[in-house]
Image: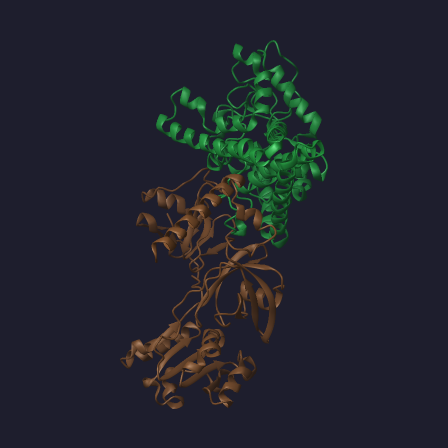
Chain colours: A brown, B green
C-alpha cells in the first residue's frame, strides 16, 4: 500500500475509533448499537442478524427459509453452513444449517430446514416461523466446499436433509464440474428435498442421479456403492447425512485405503443421552481438572472439592452468582429434574450449585 | 419490633415441623408451575419493557437538547426520570437476579447486564443477591437493615449517633445511587478492618470509574451537546437522577421497614430448612398495594413478598401468583404485611424516627 494511502487509512480508522469512543461515552453503560437496534437491527455495526423474508414449503416436513442478512455479512462459499439463533417459546436456540443460496446475492440467503420429529427449532422454522421476524446469525463457516482445482470426477452421497450443502454446491458451481454423480436417499420420492430440481438436472444430463427410496429399497449401505457407481474409487466424494450413513462411509473409504477421497459434513448436535443413573465426570476445562460425582452432588461442590475456583453465593439456586458456561455434555437441575444439554459451539449458562452431571460434562471454568 | 425469637408470642409458634414442611411443598408447587410455563409471552414482555425504556430515554435526551425551552425541560426531565426508574427497577434489578437468564439471550442476562447506576453490577449482585437475599432480615447479617448507618429494630444497639438518623435517611434518599455504591463497597468492613485493603482499593477504583462514566455522560457530554441549553440540561439530568434516587429509596424502604415485618436473630438460621427459609422471607417482607402502573414503576417490588420467595421468577408473573401466595399465608395463619404506598412509606419513616431514640424512650405496644 502506498504510504499516503496507508496514512489515509490510519487517519480514517483513528477518527472512526474516536467517534465510536465518544458515542460509547454518550450511551454508557449501553453501547450505541443498543439504541440503533430499536429501529435498524440490520444496520452496519449491529450484531449479525437476519430478517425472515419468506418460508417456502419444499416437502411435507421441509421448508426453505429465505433471509435478508444485516450489513455485516462477510459472504460465503457454496457448501458452507451458518449458525442461526432462533427464539422459540422465548428461549434462544442455536442450530446450524447449510446455505443453499448463491454467494453474491445482495444479502439474500436461504437455508432449507427439515423438521426433525422432536426438533424444537426445525419444527418452528418449518411450521411457525413468521416472515418479518428477526433471527440471530453467525458468519458462514465450514470446509465442505469444492477445492479450487475441481476434480475431474465427483460423487455426492447424501440422505435426507444432507442434500442441502450439496444443493448449495450444485446450484452455484455445477458448471465448473464435469462428471457428477449424486446418490441420494429419502424414504419416498415425495420426501426428496429439491426432488424436482435434481431430476431436472438429471434430465438435462448435468448430473447422473441415483435416487434410493429407503421405504421400498431399504437403507443404502456403502457396499451397494459398487453397483450404482462402479468407478466410485476414482471419484472425489462429498457425503452428508445422518451419522449412521456418514460413519459407515468413512469406514468404507478407509477400508479401501482412500480416506482422503471422502469429505464428510456433520451438523447434528451431539445429544448426550442421560443414562438412568446420572452423575458422571465433570471436566473443568479451563482449570484442567476432572471430578467424578454422583447424581446428588452439585457441580459446585464437586468442583470445589477438586480444587477448582468456582464463583458461588447462596448455594441454593437463588442468587445466580454461580452461573457458569456448560460447553459439552449435559447436566440435570437437581430441583426439577430438567436436563440442560450443551449445544454445539454455543455455551449454555447453568447454575453449578443446583446442577448435577448427567453423563460426562464440560464446564468453562 | 424485636427479633421474632425474642418475642413473647412468636407469630410462628403455632406451626409444627410438619406444617413448615407442608408450607414448603405448597410454595415449591407454585414456583414450579410458573417456571414450567415461562415462554414466548414472558420473553416478549421484557423485550417490550426494554424497548419502551430505551426509546423513552433516547427521546427524552433528544428533547433535552433544547432544554432551554421550559416545556422541553419539563417533558425531557419527566421522561428521563421515568426511563431511569424503569431501567433500575423493572429491568436492571430483575435481569441481574437472573429472572431472564432462561431466555439464553446474552444481552439480557445476569452475567452481562450493567445498569444505569453508580454501583457496578457485580458489586450490587454480591451485596443484594448473595447477601441480602440469603440473610434477609437477619440481625447482624443483613445490612439492608439500616444500611449500617441507621437502626431499624429494637434489637439493634442504640448509640447517640442514631439521633441523627432521620437526617441520614433523607440524605441517603437524595443521593441514593451513591449511597448504594458506598454500601456495596462495604466501607464499614474496611473501617473496622474486616476486609482486605487491596480489595477495597481495587473495588473503590472500579466504583470511581463507574461514577466517572455516569457523571461524564449526564453532567458533561449531554450538556455540552445541548449547546446553549448546557446549563438547563445539566439541571435536568441532575433532577432526573434525584427523582430516581428518591423514588427507589422510598420503594426499597417499603420492602422491609414498615411495621409488621419480622427480623431474626443470627443463631436462628443455623441449620435452616427450606420451609424455615420460606417462612423468614414471608414474614420479613412487605408488599405495596396499587395500580398496574405502580407495580411497573416499583419494578414489581410492590410484590416484595413474592419476590423474596422467588427472586428468580420473571417479575411479570408476581401479580399472577400473589393470590396463591396469600392463600398459603392464610392457610398457615401468618401475617401478610401489605399497604398502600403512602402508608408504607410513612410507616417506614416513622420507624426510623422512633428508633433514632433509645428503646425505653420510644417504647410502644408491639403491633399484633
Q: Nearer the viewer, residue B227 or A74?
A: B227
Q: Where is residue B250 in the image (x, y as percent from the top left)?
A: 63, 27
Quadrant of the image for the N terminus of chain B?
A: top right
* Residue at image coords 47%, 49%: A334
Q: From what the image shows, is residue A329 above or below residue A115? A: above
Quadrant in which residue B312 is drawn: top right
Q: Which of A201 and A176 is in front in this view?
A: A176
Quadrant of the image for the C terminus of chain B?
A: top right
Q: Which of B360 and A234 is in front in this view?
A: A234
Q: Where is residue B70 in the image (x, y as percent from the top left)?
A: 70, 31
Q: Where is residue B240 in the image (x, y as percent from the top left)?
A: 62, 31
Q: From what the image shows, is residue A131 above or below residue B30? A: below
Quadrant in which residue A154 is drawn: bottom left
Q: In this view, does A40 lie to the left or right of B120?
A: right
Q: Where is residue B353 in the image (x, y as percent from the top left)?
A: 62, 16
The tally of labels here is 0
Q: Which of A169 and B151 is in front in this view?
A: A169
Q: From what the image shows, is residue A278 above or below residue A182? A: above
Query: Seen from this angle, which residue lies furthest front?
Result: A4
Query: Seen from this angle, which residue lies furthest left?
Result: A257
Query: Looking at the image, can residue A53 be seen?
Result: yes
* Residue at image coords 62%, 37%: B65
* Residue at image coords 62%, 38%: B61
Query: Looking at the image, can residue A245 be seen?
Result: no
Q: From what the image shows, is residue B254 above or below residue A320? A: above
Amino acid at each position: 500500500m502506498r504510504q499516503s494511502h496507508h496514512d489515509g487509512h490510519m487517519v480514517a480508522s483513528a477518527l472512526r475509533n474516536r467517534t465510536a469512543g465518544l458515542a460509547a461515552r454518550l450511551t454508557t453503560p449501553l453501547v450505541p448499537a443498543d439504541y440503533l437496534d430499536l429501529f435498524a437491527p440490520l444496520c452496519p455495526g449491529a450484531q449479525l442478524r437476519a430478517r425472515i423474508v419468506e418460508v417456502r414449503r419444499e416437502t411435507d416436513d421441509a421448508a426453505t427459509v429465505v433471509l435478508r442478512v444485516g450489513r455485516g455479512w462477510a459472504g460465503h462459499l457454496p457448501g458452507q453452513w451458518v449458525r442461526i439463533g432462533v427464539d422459540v417459546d422465548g428461549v434462544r436456540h442455536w442450530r446450524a444449517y447449510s446455505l443453499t443460496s448463491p454467494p453474491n446475492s445482495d444479502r439474500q440467503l436461504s437455508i432449507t430446514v427439515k423438521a426433525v420429529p422432536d426438533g424444537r427449532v426445525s419444527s418452528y422454522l418449518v411450521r411457525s416461523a413468521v416472515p418479518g421476524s428477526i433471527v440471530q446469525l453467525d458468519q458462514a463457516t465450514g470446509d465442505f466446499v469444492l477445492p479450487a482445482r475441481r476434480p475431474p470426477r465427483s460423487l455426492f452421497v447424501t440422505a435426507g436433509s444432507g442434500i442441502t450443502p450439496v444443493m448449495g454446491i450444485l446450484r452455484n458451481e455445477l458448471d465448473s464440474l464435469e462428471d457428477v454423480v449424486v446418490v441420494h436417499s429419502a424414504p419416498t420420492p415425495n420426501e426428496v428435498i429439491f426432488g424436482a430440481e435434481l431430476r431436472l438436472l438429471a434430465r438435462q444430463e448435468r448430473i447422473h442421479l441415483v435416487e434410493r427410496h429407503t421405504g421400498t429399497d431399504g437403507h443404502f449401505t456403502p457396499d451397494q456403492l459398487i453397483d450404482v457407481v462402479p468407478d466410485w474409487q476414482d471419484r472425489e466424494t462429498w457425503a452428508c447425512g445422518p451419522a449412521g450413513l456418514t460413519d459407515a462411509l468413512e469406514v468404507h473409504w478407509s477400508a479401501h485405503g482412500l480416506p482422503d477421497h471422502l469429505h464428510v459434513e456433520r451438523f447434528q448436535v451431539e445429544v448426550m443421552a442421560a443414562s438412568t443413573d446420572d452423575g458422571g465426570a465433570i471436566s473443568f476445562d479451563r482449570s484442567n481438572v476432572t471430578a467424578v460425582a454422583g447424581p446428588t452432588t452439585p457441580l459446585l461442590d464437586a468442583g470445589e472439592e477438586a480444587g477448582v475456583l468456582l464463583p458461588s453465593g447462596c448455594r441454593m439456586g437463588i442468587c445466580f452468582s454461580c452461573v457458569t458456561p456448560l460447553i459439552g455434555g449435559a447436566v440435570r437441575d437437581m430441583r426439577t429434574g430438567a436436563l440442560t444439554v450443551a449445544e454445539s459451539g454455543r455455551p449454555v449458562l447453568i447454575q453449578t450449585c443446583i446442577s448435577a452431571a448427567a453423563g460426562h460434562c464440560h464446564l468453562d471454568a | 419490633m424485636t427479633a421474632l425469637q425474642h418475642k413473647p408470642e412468636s407469630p410462628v409458634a403455632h406451626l409444627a415441623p410438619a406444617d413448615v414442611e407442608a408450607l414448603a411443598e405448597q410454595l415449591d408447587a407454585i414456583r414450579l408451575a410458573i417456571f414450567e410455563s415461562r415462554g414466548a409471552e414472558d420473553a416478549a414482555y421484557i423485550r417490550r419493557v426494554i424497548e419502551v425504556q430505551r426509546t423513552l430515554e433516547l427521546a427524552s435526551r433528544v428533547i433535552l437538547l433544547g432544554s432551554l425551552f421550559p416545556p422541553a425541560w419539563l417533558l425531557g426531565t419527566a421522561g428521563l426520570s421515568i426511563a431511569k426508574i424503569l431501567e433500575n427497577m423493572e429491568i436492571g434489578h430483575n435481569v441481574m437476579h437472573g429472572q431472564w437468564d432462561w431466555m439464553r439471550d446474552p444481552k439480557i442476562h445476569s452475567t452481562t447486564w450493567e445498569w444505569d447506576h453508580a454501583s457496578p453490577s457485580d458489586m450490587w449482585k454480591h451485596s443484594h443477591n448473595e447477601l441480602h437475599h440469603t440473610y434477609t432480615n437477619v440481625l447482624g447479617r443483613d445490612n439492608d437493615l439500616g444500611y449500617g448507618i441507621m437502626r431499624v429494630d429494637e434489637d439493634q444497639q442504640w448509640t447517640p449517633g442514631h439521633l441523627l438518623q432521620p437526617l441520614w435517611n433523607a440524605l441517603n434518599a437524595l443521593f441514593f445511587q451513591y449511597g448504594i455504591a458506598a454500601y456495596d463497597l462495604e466501607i464499614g468492613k474496611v473501617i473496622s478492618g474486616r476486609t482486605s485493603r487491596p480489595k477495597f482499593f481495587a473495588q473503590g477504583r472500579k466504583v470511581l470509574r463507574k461514577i466517572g462514566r455516569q457523571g461524564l455522560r449526564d453532567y458533561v457530554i449531554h450538556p455540552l451537546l445541548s449547546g446553549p441549553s448546557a446549563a438547563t440540561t445539566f439541571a435536568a439530568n441532575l433532577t432526573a437522577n434525584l427523582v430516581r434516587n428518591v423514588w427507589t429509596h422510598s420503594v426499597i424502604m417499603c420492602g422491609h421497614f414498615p411495621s409488621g415485618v419480622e427480623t431474626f436473630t443470627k443463631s436462628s438460621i443455623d441449620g435452616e430448612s427450606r420451609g424455615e427459609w420460606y417462612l423468614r422471607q414471608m414474614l420479613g417482607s412487605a408488599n405495596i398495594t396499587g395500580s398496574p402502573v405502580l407495580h411497573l414503576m416499583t419494578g414489581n417490588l410492590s410484590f416484595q413478598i413474592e419476590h423474596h420467595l422467588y427472586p428468580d421468577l420473571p417479575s411479570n408473573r408476581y401479580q399472577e401468583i400473589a393470590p396463591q401466595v396469600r392463600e398459603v399465608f392464610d392457610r398457615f395463619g401468618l401475617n401478610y404485611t401489605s399497604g398502600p404506598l403512602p402508608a408504607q412509606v410513612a410507616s417506614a419513616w416513622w420507624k426510623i424516627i422512633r428508633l433514632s431514640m433509645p428503646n425505653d424512650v420510644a417504647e410502644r405496644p408491639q403491633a399484633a
